[in-house]
Image: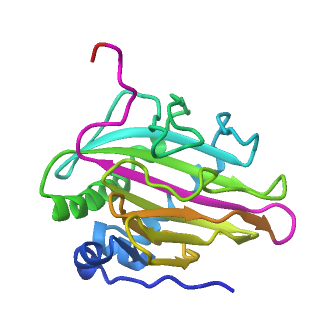
Amino acid sequence: MTLHPPITPPHQVLAVLRDRGYAILSREGLCELVGTSGAALDALSPAWNDLPSDTYLRDGGRYRFRRHSCFIVEGTALTQVPHRAHWQPVEYNALHGGLERWFEPMTQDVVEQPVWTRLLSGLAACCSGLKGPRPWYVEAHQFRIDTASGIGRPTPEGAHRDGVDFVAVLLVGREGIKGGETRVFEAAGPHGIRFTLTEPWSVLLLDDERVIHETTPIQPLEGQGHRDTLVLTFRAKGFQGPRREGV
């Protein structure tokens, strides 16, 4: 059974994030929030057909494909920074934490589209609405999880936080699969919610300090299927990175 997510109107996003620590926008709501069209977002989608394999999976799987790039948002200005490794401490990622992972960068035909700037700056404005205006250090991850081996794991590390301020999980699309249920839990309480994102360009917004999240494995309906997402993390104090000796 597919549980539909509770949709938040765009004008209530900040209030709901303050109250619950998470909010879910429909495709239409995301377009309204960031000031773009659905067609402009759809123009990004073909890029998910050209993602290199993730060679760092420590569970031995070959079901994940991804690209990764980093940006700084200041107001409506977006700057792409020189390519850098993705790194998380083991406290937030027990499976892959403490490892510098170098993924292929996002392609310029994605990041140079005007909708890309609108998307990141619009979501950063939500972060500033909660925390106050400031530069936001954004890591962008394009993911494809497939079922070529029978099962794919969107979050092989399990339920987790990302060690940032905010997370946006955007569903780009899903095809020929079952599963992929999203679960959000209070980090310091008993309550949680589960649902399945099915609408392309619907988005889950998370206050990473207050909630933990995971997505259940996917399996094929017939033949091979996949689930595509764009995960954006927003951090106020610079990008995460390993502590260097003497620093």
Q: Residue at x 59, y 50 (%)?
A: 157
Q: Is residue 123 above or below residue 239?
A: below
Residue farthest along the top direction in this orientation: 246
Q: Which stretch appears magenta?
A: 221-245
| Residue 44 appears in view | no
Residue 131 lies, in percent from the top left, at 17, 59
As drawn, is 180 to the left or to the right of 35?
A: right
Residue 18 lies, in percent from the top left, at 24, 73
Q: Residue at x 34, y 49 (%)?
A: 164
Residue 171 lies, in percent from the top left, at 53, 65
Which picture quadrant has residue 210?
bottom left
As drawn, is 76 to the left or to the right of 24?
A: left
As drawn, is 84 to the left or to the right of 47?
A: left
Q: Residue at x 63, y 56 (%)?
A: 154
Residue 20 lies, in percent from the top left, at 32, 76
Q: Residue at x 36, y 58 (%)?
A: 208
In terms of depth relative to the viewer, which is nearer, 231 or 17?
A: 17
Q: Is residue 74 above or below residue 80?
A: below
Q: Which color mode does the image show?
A: rainbow
| Residue 40 appears in view | yes
Residue 240 within the magenta-colored segment of the rendering: yes
Q: Is residue 126 above or below residue 139?
A: below
Q: Main secondary structure of the magenta part?
A: loop
In terms of depth relative to the viewer, which is nearer, 113 or 200?
A: 200
